[in-house]
Amino acid sequence: MKTKINKKLCTVTILAILLCTSSIGTVVNAFEIPEKIETPKDVDPAKVLSFLRDIFQINIDKYDITLMPLSTIRWNDVAATEGQYYLVYSDYDNNEGSSSLKVNFSFWNSELVGCDIQRTNYDDGIIHYTQKQDGDVRKTVTGFLQRYQAHTKDEQIIQMINLLNIADLINGYTKTNNNLQFKVQIFDENRYYLVWSNTVNGADYSKLTLSFKNGELANFFDDRAFYVLGSDVVNVSKEQAISIALEHAASLSYTVDGEVISGFNIVNEQIRIQPSRLSRPAESLLVKYPIWIVELPLADIYPGMVSVISVMLWADTGEVISVQPLGAGFPNDSMDDSADGSSSLPDSGLSSDDNNIPLTVYLAGACIAIIIPIAIVIVVFKRRNKQK
């Protein structure tokens, strides 16, 4: 009977994998995505287990561990590798039942940059720690950062701990010291983020993020070793940037169905400006420079559903990067590419907060979501058979 059940489980698993990979192929063909490459040999998934044990303090010896297939793509200057470990614990002899974790991880080149720990939805067992978390967020985060600093020898983490020590972790908090910003983002009583960002002119270009869920440290991400600042020079003030944007908007025109649209009525009282960062043309996409983004709201909706003019310019030289008519329904298929500076330069990157996560990451996640429930059944079934 056991053999028959195992064969059935294996058959279902294979069918799920085939269905998943078939679906991925269909979706991927509809999008332009980075090229998939062979996973570099220096990417070592065992580093994830060491990180879970030494930094998160999870007792990995308690679990049966399964490594899911890795997937690597070339993204900007980085070979981005995504993978997942599945950790299962079961002890029916002592009536402790089972508990399981999904651990999603990310390598950029050979460096571990992200680790996300999730309880599965199939049981309510505890997470087994070598040193149990006591619910004190400040103490838990301080310990994590101290262990991470010992692991990386990164002196900036000491500055992060100093900002943490004086932060309000209950009501939300933002503090900047020497171009390092610390922000506490509270979404609800069970979910909040702690973010340390390297900033210039009010815009971040790299960060370390920790998130908590239901009182437990659940997510880590650190891209500071990859994104760098090409320059921190800001010669153009907000007022100057707005003036430059208005000047270029005055000469802007675009064409819809053969009709030239120009002479825009801008609502000056509602002009918005924000700092950001962007890579220079012909340079690495991981090297950022400060820019201004000026949004000029229009008093009317113009042909092509245009309701705002967006102007991007370098904060050091004042040179305009792009001038774009935007709004609901834009870009319109019938609108010609005749706007001044219409070839904009998107802020391409790997940051998880910038909506630049490669499509294959989401697709792989969907695939794993199908396979994981089957893997749980197989592992728990085998463990129960052993204990019998």
Image (tube, rainbow, N blue to C red):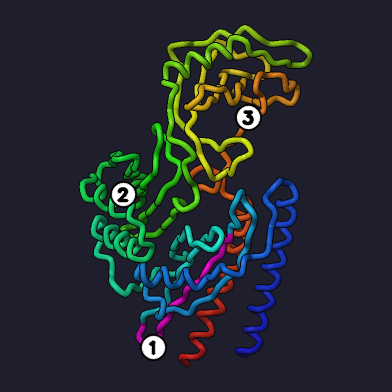
Q: Judge left or right: residue 338 versus residue 225.
A: right
Q: Is residue 247 visible?
A: yes
- Toward the right, the furthest residue is 258
| Residue closest to the far bottom | 388
Tell me if label 2 and label 1 are in contact, CB under 8 Å: no
Q: Which residue is mark 2?
A: 189
Q: Residues within 10 Å of mark 1 (few under 14, many from 20)?
A: few
Disc 3 versus disc 2: distance between alpha carbons?
40 Å
Under mark 2, the amino acid is Glu
Rounded to the nearest angstrom, the CA distance separating label 2 from label 1 is: 36 Å
**Drawn side of residue 30 relative to residue 85, left or right:** right
In the picture of the structure, the residue carrying the numbered disc 1 is: 93
Q: Which residues are magenta?
A: 81-95
Residue extending farthest to the left is: 166
Can the viewer see residue 126? no
Residue at screen point 37% across, 66% down: 151
Mark 1: secondary structure: loop
